[in-house]
Image (tube, rainbow, N blue to C red):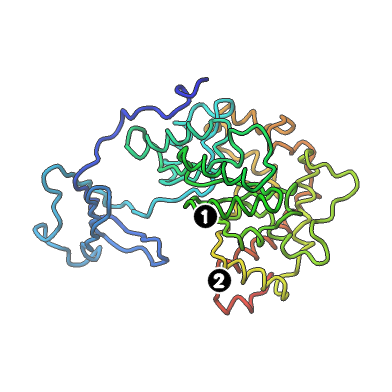
Amino acid sequence: MDANSHAGVSRDVGDGPYDRLILRDVMVIDGTGAPAYGPADVVIDKDRISRIHLVGHPTGPRLQEAERPAHGPGGRELALAGHTVLPGLVDAHGHIGWPSIAPGAQYVYDLWLGHGITTVREPGCFVNGLDFVVSEAHRAERGQIAAPRIHPYAGFGLGRTAPFTTPDEARAWVAEAAGAGAAGLKLWGYRRDIFEATIREASTLGLGTACHLQQSYVSQAHSLDAARWGLGSVEHWYGLPEAMLDGRRVQHFPAGYNYEDEVSRFTESGRLWRQAAEPGSARWAETVDELVATGVTLDPTFNVYQGLRDAARVRTLEWHADYAAPALWDHWQPGSGGHGSFFSDWGTEQEVLWKENFRLWMAFVKEFRDGDDPRRRRAQVR
């Protein structure tokens, strides 16, 4: 399948945009933590919400028709009583998918839009390539395809065949990625001086940075190191417990460990959080405090790890038969060789490890989320 046939399909459904669009009689969830309210008229002027008019209590007095906003020439209104409006969701770690595992990019876009996701950060631009993802981002922005807004993050070294040997080589590549339209960079770690130079150069050029700090590089720098240099987001959880190890730089790897064997890799990853500082300890609190102070974001992607603690349930969810794309289903078959398809040798012992891993990991994320709230000092992991 070539890039054109994999790309999003030119829009032949829907209409608009309008000079003014009014959503009538909706319930509103504003995303601030406030409770839902309504009914209300939401006024959208040229793709921006300009006003929200509270129409009245559901069983009480309502605005007179003459008092309600009008859509005017070139506008439209939708009668949406009984519907709820909320801000578009942001998928901070979403892959468009490539021809061997997805029926086409439009299949992925439809899934995102159907679940309320209106903005996606595409970390890595794997296989499809940066040019493809940048093109799709531009088409989405112009309304030529039905897709979320896409932010392309170029995978470190994308388009390069030789390894990086100096910080200057990394800086030059960052500039090339920016010139090619990348909104940011997807990193995995690297030699310490090169890793730091990459993050700092990206910040200088106004690019975002996201890092899945794989175990191959975490001995060079953990996530707190990277956050001190200006890293934008920590992907998954890699590099967080390593920042709290006592007396060692990396986790304990048993004899016979092989990083390329994913059963081995993810089994031992399930032991990692228990090797780090305990919740409530000084080291734990200091790490959370400093991470918060750096301004880094945690992007845990909890959902993709759920199967590690409950594989049989996840694999037999009732909607797979109707909605899982055949190519994706084949990719995830245990032992297929696809990344993450390691469940052919996954048992209760691994799931118990990951149940405890989740408990500690989620406690850390909660404390980070609570930020400077002093109440978190008294929080106990139960």
**Which residue lies under the disc numbered 1?**
203
Vertical side of 277 occupied by 8: above or below: above
Disc marking residue 371: 2
Q: Can the viewer see residue 302?
A: no
- Quarter residue 31 falls in: bottom left
Mark 1 to mark 2: distance in Å?
23 Å
Circle 2 crowding by C-alpha within 10 Å: few under 14, some 14–19, many from 20: some
Q: Is the C terminus in the top left, top right, bottom left or bottom right quadrant? A: bottom right
The amino acid type found where label 1 is placed reads: Ser
Residue 376 image point, x, y percent: 60, 75
Circle 1 crowding by C-alpha within 10 Å: few under 14, some 14–19, many from 20: some
Disc marking residue 313: none
In the displayed orientation, state which residue is furthest to the right: 255
Residue 187 image point, x, y percent: 61, 47
Residue nearest the observer in this picture, 155 or 18: 155
Q: Residue at x 58, y 35 (%)?
A: 126
Q: Say whether residue 254 is left or right of residue 350.
A: right
Vertical side of 197 occupied by 316: above or below: above
In the displayed orientation, state which residue is furthest to the left: 66
Q: Residue at x 65, y 51 (%)?
A: 195
Q: Say whether residue 317 is left or right of residue 348.
A: left
Residue nearest the observer in this picture, 112 or 247: 247
The amino acid type found where label 2 is placed reads: Gly
Residue 186 image point, x, y percent: 58, 45
Q: Secondary structure at mark 2?
A: loop
Mark 1 / mark 2, whichever is N-terminal: 1
Residue nearest the observer in this picture, 154 or 136: 154
Vertical side of 71 occupied by 6: above or below: above
